[in-house]
Image: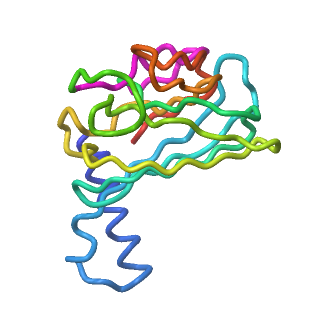
């Protein structure tokens, strides 16, 4: 796993150097992790990508989905990077290393609480979230790598413990 993380970090640094001819110092602190979302729980059309990037203390997630059902859907990072089950239950529960209460994305909620994604009639949706508590490729309890990003069937009510009452898992991707 460390080799994968190191390879990703090296590829990010080389890609940035090749594109901008910047210095090594400019690229040394930027890290990235990605997930490719696949359909789950009978949904056959959902797809998408998630990209985590930034400097330590300032990591952002950009999520883009296609083929999703129109409406509002809860989105969470789950504790296990395993989307192999047809219903994505292999991804485990919400990622919550500090044992916070479930809620809106923020310092007093689960590290995996991302809020809601609004999907338009054509099936497309975008969500951008930042969290100062996230890390990429560090191997610590705050590292997003090795977790799963899950899109749920229903809206997260941001209150019900421990999951937000957001229903089944209609999309899942392992964060690498």
Quarter assignment of residue 133: top left
Residue 23 at what x, y percent from top left? Answer: 25, 83
The quadrant the N terminus occupies is top left
40 left or right, relative to 31 = right
First to last magenta residue range: 80-97
Magenta segment's dominant SS is: loop
Q: From the viewer's side, name the closer residue of 124 and 47.
A: 124
Residue sticking out furthest to the bottom: 21
9 left or right, relative to 48 = left
The quadrant the C terminus occupies is top left
Q: From the viewer's side, name the closer residue of 66 and 90.
A: 66
- Compared to 145, does 92 lie above or below? above
Instruction: Give the residue drawn at x 56%, y 20%.
Output: 166
Q: Is residue 95 one of those drawn in magenta?
A: yes
Residue 31 at what x, y percent from top left? Answer: 31, 57
- Compared to 16, does 88 lie above or below? above
The colour scheme used here is rainbow
Q: From the viewer's side, name the closer residue of 81 and 18.
A: 81
Q: Is residue 38 one of those drawn in magenta?
A: no
Q: From the viewer's side, name the closer residue of 63 and 24.
A: 63
Instruction: Give the residue drawn at x 60%, y 16%.
Output: 168
Quarter assignment of residue 27: bottom left
- Compared to 176, does 128 lie above or below? below
Instruction: Give the residue drawn at x 59%, y 25%.
Output: 152
Instruction: Give the residue drawn at x 40%, y 79%.
Output: 18
Residue 82 at what x, y percent from top left? Answer: 44, 23
Residue 92 at what x, y percent from top left? Answer: 41, 16
- Compared to 58, does 70 lie above or below? above
Q: How many marks?
A: 0
Quarter assignment of residue 7: bottom left
């Amino acid at each position: 796993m460390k080799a994968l993380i190191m390879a990703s970090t090296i590829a990010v640094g080389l890609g940035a150097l090749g594109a901008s001819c910047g210095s090594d110092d400019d690229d040394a602190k930027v890290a990235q992790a990605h997930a490719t979302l696949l359909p789950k729980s009978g949904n056959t059309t959902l797809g998408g990508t998630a990209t985590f990037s930034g400097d330590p203390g300032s990591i952002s997630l950009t999520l883009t989905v296609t083929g999703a059902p129109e409406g509002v859907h809860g989105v969470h990072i789950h504790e296990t990077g395993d989307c192999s089950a047809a219903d994505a239950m292999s991804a485990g529960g919400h990622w919550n290393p500090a044992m916070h209460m479930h809620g809106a994305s923020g310092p007093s909620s689960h590290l995996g609480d991302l809020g809601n994604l609004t999907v338009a009639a054509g099936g497309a949706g975008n969500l951008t979230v930042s969290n100062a508590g996230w890390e990429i490729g560090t191997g610590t309890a705050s590292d997003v790598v090795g977790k799963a990003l899950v899109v749920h069937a229903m809206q997260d009510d941001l209150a019900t413990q421990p999951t937000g009452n957001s229903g089944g898992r209609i999309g899942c991707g392992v964060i690498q």
